[in-house]
Image (cartoon, grey):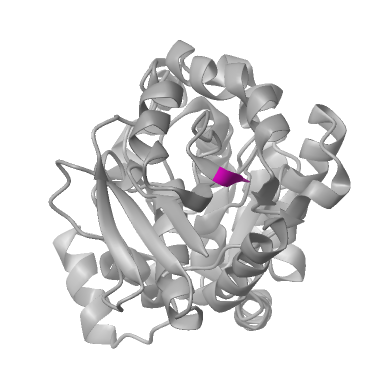
Amino acid sequence: MHIIIDSRLPFYQRGGISQYTLHLIEALAKIDRESTYQILHMGKDPADYTPKQGNFKRVNAFTPCHHRWEGVTLSLELLLRRADIIHSPDFIPPRFGGRRKIITVHDLNFLYFPQFLTVESLRYYRDQIQWAVRTADHISADSEKTRQDLIEMLGVPAEKVTTVYLSVNDVYRQKYSEEEIDETLQKHQLKRGFILAVGTVEPRKNYPLLFEAYRLLRQEYGVDVPLVLVGRDGWLTEEIYASIDQFKIKPFIRRLSGVFDKPLAHLYHAAGVLVTPSHYEGFGLPALEALNCGCPIVVSDRGSLPEIAANAGKILPPENPEQWAETLHQVLSDRPLRQEMINRGHAHARTFSWSTAAKKTLQIYRQVL
């Protein structure tokens, strides 16, 4: 098999889709030495995401991600490469250029909550998704919830969609010394036990509910720990930040950006709880990262988050700040409960692996030819 995997997105951002792409490539290299892989990079990307073994090769493209004419210009670039399979990890495949098209659909947030996206994002995802799922030869879905959404909302035949759970970077599975963790905490002037939220600041994350719950936690339960937000600014952030002022909690909020891998793992190890009150998540990678690091999680009951949390986390509807405040207080103050959640979290986290994801993806490649 000659397979091209589109890996242009990491040049622009290192969010969840980019992490999925890079880890999947690495895991495929460990199990498949027979197929020929071309890892498609942006030509001006100085980084190289290509495994060193001989059946993997870097190739470059000039077409930018999400460009208005991407479907045509990328297809023309790929046409002469004569791939058996083109795998598009960012939802939308090229118009032509390979014998078979595999796409990964991470969520259908843009159909559930179009008001939470920019005009550009809606144009790229919502306006093309019907064509993408129809033209793809097979679809990989991050979660069973996303798989069911594809079947029920877009009419995709059930046999055309396979659930392939993601996993985490190995840095979240490692053990760290207290000194390593303390060094990161000192750098950011933090003490252990803070409340942690990880992800791009955007409306879908439902941060205003978290901010109101945090105000109640301080006022009604006397919990005096900072709320640490890790992640870059996304889009439509004005109302989100206005709610910080509305609830008068600005002095207690810490904003950190550019924190990844080991430093982020240190924060998970030191945090009292990870909070994910999202309106929708296609997978919810921070929740799984936290479970691996022994950090209790409180998540919403939307999207795939109940699959990720299972019996290891607290799962709440994302509308009631009083319920979130009460639950956060319980998790932060009840030591036996915390230890039980940590133990269950470690056990549940072990059921996710990139090796399994790669094996299921390779099975998809083989079955479409």
- Establish if 117 lies above or below 89: above
Q: Position of residue 244 (x, y in %)?
A: 41, 27
Asked whether residue 184 is drawn in magenta, I would say: no
Number of on-image labels: 0
Is residue 273 in sight in this rendering? yes
Asked whether residue 101 is drawn in magenta, I would say: yes
Is residue 314 in sight in this rendering? no
Q: Position of residue 27 (x, y in %)?
A: 46, 74
- Which quarter of the picture shows residue 287? bottom right
Q: Position of residue 112 (x, y in %)?
A: 70, 25
Q: Position of residue 368 (x, y in %)?
A: 70, 56
The residue lying at 85 percent from left, 31 percent from top is 155
Name the residue nearer the viewer: 201 or 304.
Answer: 304
- As drawn, is 158 to the left or to the right of 271? right
Which portion, as a residue range, is magenta? Answer: 99-104
- As drawn, is 264 to the left or to the right of 334? left
Name the residue nearer the viewer: 211 or 296.
Answer: 296
- Establish if 244 lies above or below 36: above
Quarter of the image containing the C terminus? Answer: bottom right
Q: Main secondary structure of the magenta part?
A: strand
Name the residue nearer the viewer: 336 or 42.
Answer: 42
The residue lying at 37 percent from left, 41 percent from top is 80
The residue lying at 53 percent from left, 17 percent from top is 122
- As drawn, is 101 to the left or to the right of 36? right
- As drawn, is 196 to the left or to the right of 148? left
- Which quarter of the picture shows residue 339? bottom right
- Establish if 157 lies above or below 333: above
The residue lying at 48 percent from left, 71 percent from top is 35
